[in-house]
């Protein structure tokens, strides 16, 4: 009884800390980056127009993703208003649930100490935590896939029908978040695990009631896909399944490509700092995986995601994140082996030193990067807020040298955990205050008459809570200013000779996008 109470208390503690880390600062800085801006605005337009089937951005059909994350954002808008916190709120909730539910299953199927190592690996992985501060579909997909896979393993061990039903429900909801990937990769993982454990038989497969899963999928996901197909005369279906699934896998899209090693680099970055132990961790899995079904399962989950997206034509850091809870467990199991054997091998020492050097470099590299951006030069000293991480990592190195492996791990982990409040409460608010949208707010008011020439920064609609019509020719510019002499013309197009050579308009704002190549310019008619 005491053990159950302790497990319950530990789960609530992990949930509380995870909620703090995944939600802190979510409303402290504006929505600006491209993916966030488009997703948050599509949700706003759904709410504004009461159109909950067909997603649009700036009143143009958006075929990038299914709608489930839009619905959660709409609920966030209802509770907190149409703002950054409303858009990001449920991303943080699902992030906290991902970490805490994974902790629960680590504790259930492994040792308590390994579960705690696991959770510290997750909390200290700043780029993983950052994903749950974004108004994008990935936090939801990470939860649906990772918890669904935990439930698969739970059913494999316990034969709980409740786990099986919830598993199929989560995978179905995953298809409403990002499409068939939420079924295809988990299906492949489960198949490989059954093969790896020599349980791939018709009898075992039927135990998982695949026909029940198919029925749940039809009930949960199929209605929306059918409705959106007919509402858009097949345009959404074609755009999503051909362009954003087949073409995205088969070729580089939107400049996001590269050699297969880029995916491994994304993984190292995503679970940094402890991801640098990944080679040793996989070696540990190779030695013990067959005897330990949980370790084998976690290794297969990690390997399938990494290999699949290594061969994908389009490569992005968030693609492999649904496997991170399992990869974090693979790392945690390896760390426990290091601790038990008092491992101070040359490889472990090199990795600890490397982590320390990266931590020391953070404020230096950060300041240098900010100095390269003209708009951020005055804010470059903000990089010194990263010094606590450098100091903590140095303490961790000192403790490791002295033979205190456990204390060294905790010192390093806490040093990286502290980046989260610093990043989202201090650094991001300061930096994003210089973005073109925030600077434009000093000139433009929400109800001003504004047209866009050719193209614009995607963050404008959600921040001004309106859509913008686009014009493309000089004749349209003439007609616009004739009708609206007090109006504004906005663009971030590179071909601006048409505007710069006109003598009847003046430029009232020119701001380069942060860390990007395009520049927002705003013009108005001369008095």
Image (cartoon, rainbow, N blue to C red):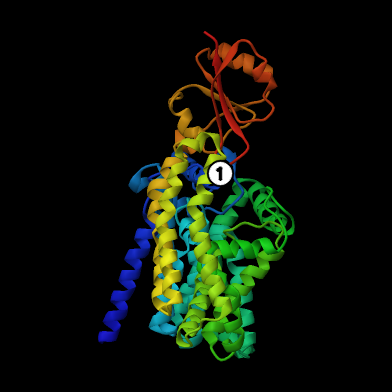
Residue located 67% across and 30% down the image: 494
Q: Is residue 182 above or below residue 158?
A: above
Front in this rendered view, residue 299 or 135? 299
Helix or strand or loop: what does disc 1 sit on? helix
Q: Is residue 171 above or below residue 498?
A: below
Q: Is residue 34 above or below residue 143?
A: above
Circle 1 sits on which residue?
34
Residue located 72% across and 53% down the image: 252
Q: Residue furthest top?
A: 527
Residue 206 figure quarter = bottom right
Spot occupied by residue 366 in the image (x, y as percentages of width and height): 51, 49
Spot occupied by residue 419 in the image (x, y as percentages of width and height): 42, 57
Front in this rendered view, residue 312 or 282? 282
Task: Tell me if 241 is positioned left or right of 217 in this view.
Answer: right
Spot occupied by residue 430 in the image (x, y as percentages of width and height): 42, 41
Front in this rendered view, residue 310 or 113? 113
Residue located 69% across and 27% down the image: 495
């Amino acid at each position: 009884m005491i053990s159950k109470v302790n497990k319950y208390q530990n789960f609530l503690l992990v949930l509380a800390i995870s909620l703090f880390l995944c939600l802190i600062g979510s409303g402290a800085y504006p929505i600006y980056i491209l993916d966030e801006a488009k997703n948050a605005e599509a949700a706003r337009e759904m709410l504004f127009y009461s159109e909950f089937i067909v997603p649009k951005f700036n009143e143009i059909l958006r075929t990038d993703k299914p709608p489930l994350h839009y619905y959660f954002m709409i609920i966030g808008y209802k509770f907190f208003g149409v703002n950054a916190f409303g858009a990001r709120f449920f991303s943080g909730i699902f992030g906290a649930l991902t970490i805490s539910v994974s902790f629960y299953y680590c504790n259930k199927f492994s040792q308590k100490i390994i579960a705690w190592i696991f959770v510290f690996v997750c909390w200290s992985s700043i780029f993983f935590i950052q994903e749950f501060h974004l108004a994008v579909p990935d936090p939801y997909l990470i939860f649906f896939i990772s918890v669904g896979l935990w439930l698969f393993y739970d059913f494999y061990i316990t034969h709980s029908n409740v786990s099986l039903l919830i598993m199929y429900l989560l995978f179905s909801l995953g298809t409403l978040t990002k499409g068939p990937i939420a079924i295809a990769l988990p299906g492949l993982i489960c198949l490989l695990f059954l093969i790896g454990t020599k349980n791939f038989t018709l009898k075992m497969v039927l135990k998982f009631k695949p026909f029940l899963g198919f029925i749940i999928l039809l009930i949960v996901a199929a209605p929306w896909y059918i409705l959106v197909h007919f509402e858009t005369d097949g345009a959404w279906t074609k755009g999503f399944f051909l362009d954003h699934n087949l073409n995205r896998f088969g070729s580089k899209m939107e400049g996001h490509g590269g050699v297969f090693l880029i995916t491994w680099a994304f993984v190292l970055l995503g679970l940094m700092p402890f991801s640098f132990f990944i080679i040793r961790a996989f070696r540990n899995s190779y030695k013990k995986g067959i005897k330990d079904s949980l370790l084998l399962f976690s290794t297969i989950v990690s390997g399938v995601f990494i290999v699949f997206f290594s061969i994908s034509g389009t490569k992005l850091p968030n693609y492999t994140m649904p496997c991170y809870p399992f990869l974090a467990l693979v790392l945690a199991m390896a760390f426990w082996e290091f601790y038990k054997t008092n491992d101070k091998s040359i490889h472990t020492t090199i990795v600890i030193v490397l982590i320390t050097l990266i931590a020391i470099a953070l404020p230096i590299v950060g300041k240098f990067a900010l100095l390269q951006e003209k708009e951020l030069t005055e804010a470059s000293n903000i990089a010194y807020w990263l010094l606590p991480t450098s100091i903590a990592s140095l303490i961790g190195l000192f403790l490791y040298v002295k033979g205190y492996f456990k204390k060294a791990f905790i010192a390093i982990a806490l040093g990286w955990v502290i980046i989260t409040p610093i990043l989202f409460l201090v650094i991001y608010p300061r930096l994003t205050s210089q973005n073109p949208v925030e600077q434009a707010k000093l000139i433009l008011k929400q109800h001003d008459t504004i047209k866009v020439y050719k193209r614009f920064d995607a963050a404008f609609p959600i921040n001004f809570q309106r859509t913008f019509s686009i014009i493309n020719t000089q004749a349209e510019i003439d007609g616009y200013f004739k009708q609206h002499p007090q109006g504004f013309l906005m663009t971030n197009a590179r071909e601006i000779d048409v505007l710069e050579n006109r003598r009847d308009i003046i430029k009232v704002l020119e701001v380069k996008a942060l860390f990007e190549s395009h520049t927002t310019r705003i013009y108005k008619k001369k008095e």
